[in-house]
Structures are given as structure tokens and as C-alpha cells.
Image (cartoon, grey):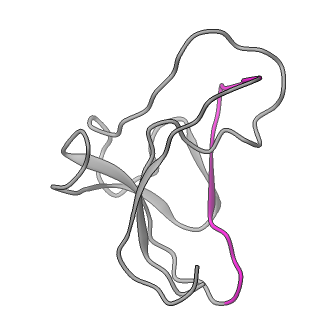
């Protein structure tokens, strides 16, 4: 996939984190993250994920950005550690800034 995307993740990619119940609400923003590093508690499973400054962030200054340029049907994935939800609702805000495939 030839894409450089900025993904602003508010209720992030939790789908692969398990099925046991965890109560309460959780949200993430990246306002206090050190720029140029993976956000605390997140992993670089596939792709290159870093916190970067983006003036259009829903809660400025930072967003979690996917910076890898991949070819073919590569799907970039970041996971959040210390989460274990069941029956969840998830909301993700994202902004594609380049690319020619989905």
C-alpha cells in the first residue's frame, strides 16, 4: 500500500487484544507524547507508528501517525497494551494524506 496516513486514534485498534471483559471507558489522545516515538502503551506491529505534531489534531498538538510506505496489500497495525475489552464500541478519527490504494 503506497500510503502515508495520519491516524488520529481516539478509541484505537483494540480488536486483537482479547475477549475478557474490562469495564469503564477508555480514550487516547497523544498530547503528552514525545514526538517521533511510538505512543506509550502502543506497539509497532506492522508499519511505522509515531506521535507527531499536527495542527489539525482533534486535541492538539499531537496525533498518532502511520508513516510507513508499503507496497501491495499491507495493512499497518498498532495495538494497545493493557486492554482487554468485550462488547466494545470503538471510534477512530483518521486523515489520509497520501496514497493511491485503499
> Which residues are drawn in magenta?
72-86
**Was residue 52 drawn as part of the magenta stretch in this picture?**
no
**Relative side of 66 to 79, left or right:** left
Q: Give the residue at x 62% y 30%.
A: 89
Q: Residue furthest top?
A: 23
Residue 52 spot, x, y in % from top left = 30, 56
Q: Quadrant of residue 39?
A: top left
Reply above or below: 9 against 50.
Answer: above
Reply above or below: 67 against 38.
Answer: below
**Relative side of 19 to 69, left or right:** right
In the depicted view, which residue is nearer to us: 32 or 24? 24
Q: Main secondary structure of the magenta part?
A: loop
Q: Give the residue at x 43% y 32%.
A: 28
Reply above or below: 42 against 48.
Answer: above
Q: Give the residue at x 22% y 57%.
A: 54
Image label count: 0
**Was residue 78 drawn as part of the magenta stretch in this picture?**
yes
Amino acid at each position: 500500500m503506497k500510503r502515508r496516513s495520519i491516524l488520529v486514534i481516539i478509541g484505537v485498534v483494540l480488536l486483537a487484544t482479547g475477549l475478557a471483559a474490562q469495564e469503564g471507558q477508555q480514550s487516547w489522545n497523544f498530547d503528552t507524547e514525545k514526538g517521533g516515538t511510538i505512543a506509550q502503551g502502543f506497539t509497532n506491529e506492522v508499519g511505522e507508528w509515531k506521535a507527531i505534531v499536527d495542527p489539525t489534531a482533534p486535541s492538539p498538538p499531537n496525533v498518532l501517525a502511520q508513516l510507513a510506505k508499503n507496497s501491495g496489500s499491507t495493512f499497518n497495525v498498532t495495538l494497545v497494551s493493557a486492554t482487554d475489552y468485550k462488547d466494545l464500541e470503538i471510534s477512530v478519527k483518521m486523515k489520509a494524506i497520501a496514497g493511491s490504494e485503499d
